[in-house]
């Protein structure tokens, strides 16, 4: 077959939704394969910017073949960024301090997930007994003071290595997120500084906080907490209510899962179709999934 024959075949495939999905998934997998050859010092955030540019350019053009090429390139960039964001374990990682009771200092990479008595936080830019340590730490701290994304905190705890739970490879699950150690502390955390996170993510988390506040004002407890679990995946219900959900097999709807995404997108889609065409509404929903 000549080059023009291949181009003709590609143009035909570009019209099929199933082939479009195939090329996008292939681009993501290809990106992971390519990333294995790249140096780990390469900043994955630069690729996220490239992917966003390719995505929005693809929305502006009308040719299906060029649109598919750009979406595939966008998926490949995301695949590379995903691989590089989970770097191999380093010698200076926080794992070196596992088994020790130490003073830990770090910056929150997400808003905490809270329960009645504790808040679950992820920390980056860690130092242990003033010694810098790479990788991330998962910590369970007292419920108050309430922490938020970008806070730099200090507390004392014993560092532990994650372990599998009832056959579930919980350690590998955390490792895929760059978390290599956990700790549990009853000490009240000391907030050293605030607003230390990325400005864009701060805007996203502030928007989520506004939604949470709106739910709290509009609904009584525990209905507001249930709405947060359904829409945002926030675990803020009491242990008794969570146990009731586990007993009837519905605990999955309280986690950040496909159910939550579907619920959020359904509400968003119904609202958007009143103002814009359905096809354009789908583009906004794709952006909403990324932000979610």
Image (cartoon, rainbow, N blue to C red):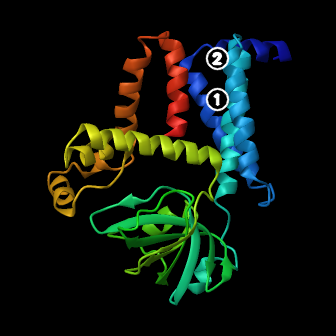
Q: Residue at x 85, y 17 (%)?
A: 3
Judging depth in this view, the residue of 59 and 16 nearest the camera is: 59
Question: In the picture provided, is 25 more to the left or to the right than 101?
Answer: right
**Measured along the vertical axis of the image, is residue 46 above or below residue 141?**
above
Question: In the picture provided, is 204 more to the left or to the right than 9?
Answer: left
Judging depth in this view, the residue of 24 and 155 nearest the camera is: 155
Query: Disc 1, disc 2: CB below 8 Å?
Result: yes
Secondary structure found at label 2: helix
Q: Residue at x 34, y 38 (%)?
A: 214
Toward which corner of the image does residue 86 lie, by quadrant?
bottom right
Q: Residue at x 69, y 10 (%)?
A: 62
Image coordinates of residue 231 in percent, x first then y, are: 35, 40
Q: How many marks?
A: 2
Residue 250 visible in image? yes
Toward which corner of the image does residue 219 lie, by quadrant?
top left
Residue 169 visible in image? no
**Measured along the vertical axis of the image, is residue 280 above or below residue 196?**
above
Name the disc covering residue 23, or none: 1
**Measured along the vertical axis of the image, is residue 77 above or below residue 12?**
below
What residue is shown with label 2?
Answer: 13
Q: Could you tell me how far apart the alpha carbons at marks 1 and 2 are, in whole angstroms?
A: 10 Å
How dense is the environment of label 1, judged by Cα within 10 Å: few (below 14), some, or many (20 and up)? many
Which corner quadrant holds the N terminus?
top right
Question: In the picture provided, is 280 more to the left or to the right than 220?
Answer: right
The residue at the far bottom in this view is 100
Image coordinates of residue 289 in percent, x first then y, are: 50, 35
Image coordinates of residue 98 in percent, x first then y, are: 54, 85
Image coordinates of residue 92 in percent, x first then y, are: 69, 79
Question: In the picture provided, is 126 more to the left or to the right than 277?
Answer: right
Judging depth in this view, the residue of 74 and 11 nearest the camera is: 74
Toward which corner of the image does residue 259 lie, by quadrant?
top left
């Amino acid at each position: 077959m000549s080059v023009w024959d291949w181009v003709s075949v590609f143009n035909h495939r570009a019209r099929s939704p199933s082939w479009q999905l195939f090329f996008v998934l292939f681009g993501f997998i290809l990106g992971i394969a390519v990333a294995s050859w790249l140096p780990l010092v390469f900043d994955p955030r630069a690729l996220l910017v490239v992917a966003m540019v390719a995505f929005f350019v693809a929305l502006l053009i009308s040719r299906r073949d060029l649109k598919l090429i750009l979406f595939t390139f966008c998926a490949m960039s995301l695949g590379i960024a995903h691989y590089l964001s989970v770097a191999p374990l380093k010698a200076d990682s926080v794992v070196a301090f596992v088994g020790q009771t130490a003073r830990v200092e770090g910056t929150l990479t997400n808003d905490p997930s809270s329960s009645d008595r504790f808040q679950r936080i992820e920390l980056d830019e860690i130092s242990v007994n003033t010694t810098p340590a790479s990788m991330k730490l998962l910590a369970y701290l007292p419920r108050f003071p309430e922490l938020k994304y970008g806070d730099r905190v200090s507390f004392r705890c014993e560092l532990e290595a994650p372990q599998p739970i009832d056959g579930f490879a919980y350690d590998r699950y955390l490792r895929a997120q760059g978390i290599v150690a956990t700790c549990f502390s009853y000490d009240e955390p000391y907030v050293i500084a605030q607003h230390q996170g990325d400005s864009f993510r701060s805007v996203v988390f502030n928007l989520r906080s506004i939604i949470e506040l709106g739910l709290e004002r509009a609904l009584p407890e525990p209905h507001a907490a249930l709405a947060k679990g359904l829409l945002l995946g926030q675990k803020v219900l009491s242990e008794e209510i969570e146990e009731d959900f586990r007993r009837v097999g519905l605990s999955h709807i309280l986690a950040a899962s496909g159910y939550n995404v579907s619920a959020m997108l359904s509400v968003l889609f119904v609202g958007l179709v009143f103002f814009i065409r359905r096809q354009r509404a789908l583009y906004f929903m794709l952006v909403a999934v990324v932000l979610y």
